[in-house]
Image (spheres, rainbow, N blue to C red):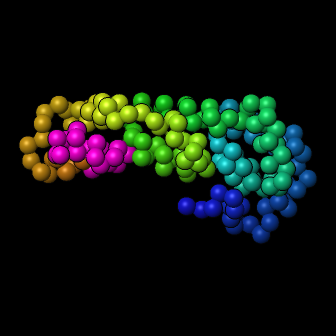
Amino acid sequence: MPDRDAEPDTGQACPEAALAGASPAEIRSRALKLLTTREHSRYELWRKLHLRGYPAEAVNAVLDALAADGLLSEERLLAAYVAERLDKGFGPLRIRAELQAKGLSDAAIDPHLNLDDAAYLERMTAVDAGKFGRAPADDRQTLAKRARFLEYRGFPAHLIARVLALD
């Protein structure tokens, strides 16, 4: 995973040269346009604005102001994203990886993925039944297929074994 603090490589010699004279109002407008489509993490917004050629210092100042105004909230992003992904049948391992790719720390993610095993087992059972029906798997090939599917969805192996009655 790339260093979150490092500036992304845009392939241009100096992206700041193109928009070095960009006003904070212009950068803020672009950031707000991105935020109207969905919540973004600070890292995502910074990357998108920097890739457009806005200077890093100006982008950081605008993002600080947006956060101070409550328009950029990683807490709001976490709550909405985790709820959406859980509702779609994804597990904690996959959700955590997706949030880390958005530049969020484990310390920020943990409170949102603190469901107990029983809650995850219930979700896994529903996901498994939705994909494979309620009939028990009677051969190893079918069990392996179901286990791979649940693993892909981001559920931990110890819970997959319980759902598939392998333990």
Asked whether, in this view, residue 31 is left or right of residue 108, the answer is right
Query: Residue visible at 85% across and 50% down?
Result: 58
Q: Is residue 8 above or below residue 46?
A: below
The image quarter containing residue 50 is: bottom right
The image quarter containing residue 118 is: top left
Give the magenta range: 148-167
**Front-lying residue, 76 or 22:** 76
**Front-lying residue, 117 or 24:** 117
How far across and how far down the image is residue 28, in percent? 81, 39
Query: Residue visible at 67% across and 49% down?
Result: 43
Asked whether, in this view, residue 28 is left or right of residue 145, the answer is right
Query: Residue visible at 75% across and 40% down?
Result: 31
Q: Is residue 145 above or below residue 3?
A: above
Magenta segment includes 115: no
Q: Is residue 83 above or below residue 92?
A: above
User: Quadrant of the image for the N terminus?
Assistant: bottom right
